[in-house]
Image: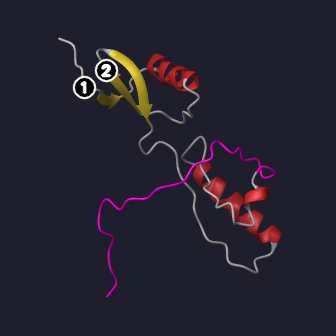
Amino acid sequence: MMEHFPRLRRLKTDAEILRVAEIARGEEHICFDPSHGIWKDGHLVGHFSICAAPFVMGHIPRGTRPRESVNLISVAEDIAASQFNHVFFPVAKTSPFHPLMGRLGFDQVAEMDLFYKELKPQCQVS
């Protein structure tokens, strides 16, 4: 029986991971750490990366010296490298770091907006 509605399931083999990377490249889409494949009618057609790559976001206060700022970014990278193969650093175009990220070894992967949705209520301090 064919499943006409797409299904999501964890990718299990290197061949599946390579296949979704190939599919993404063919549609000019980025593919980082795919964790789950999209299957339709028995064929692997796409992917999601769910909790697969860390995002490092922070606030370095104004007045922090450039060398100190670069050191802080480097330490954050080291922490991420202890658990992951790569890291995403979302940086606003208005940030003074935006024009420097390439010189710090980062590649800009796409022009996009980052969306956020709270899935579980956070602890509230009363």
What quarter of the picture does the C terminus occupy? bottom left
Q: Quick check: 43 left or right of 91?
A: left
Q: Residue 26 location in percent, x, y?
A: 56, 21
Q: Is residue 112 magenta?
A: yes
Q: Which one is nearer the viewer's eye here, 66 or 28?
A: 28
Percent from the top left, x then y, of residue 14? Answer: 48, 20
The x and y percentages for residue 29 are: 56, 32
Q: Are marks 1 and 2 in contact (CB under 8 Å)?
A: yes
**Lower position in the chain sequence, tag 1 or tag 2:** 1
Residue 35 on the magenta span: no
Q: Dividing the image into 4 quarters, which one contains the N terminus? A: top left
Residue in view at x 24 percent, y 20 percent: 4
**Which quadrant of the figure has residue 46?**
top left
**Secondary element at image label 1:** loop
Q: Residue at x 29, y 68 (%)?
A: 121
Q: Residue at coordinates 78% horizontally, 57% vertically from top-left? A: 99
Magenta part of the protein: which range? 102-126
Q: Quadrant of residue 100?
A: bottom right
19 is higher (above) or lower (below) than 10: above
Whether 69 is drawn above or below 45: the answer is below
Q: CA distance from mark 1 to mark 2?
A: 6 Å
**Where is 99 relative to 36, above or below?**
below
- The colour scheme applied to this rendered structure is secondary structure
Q: To which quarter of the image does residue 77 belong?
A: bottom right
Q: Which mark is residue 52?
A: none
Residue 5's label in the rendered image is 1
Residue on which the image places disc 2: 40
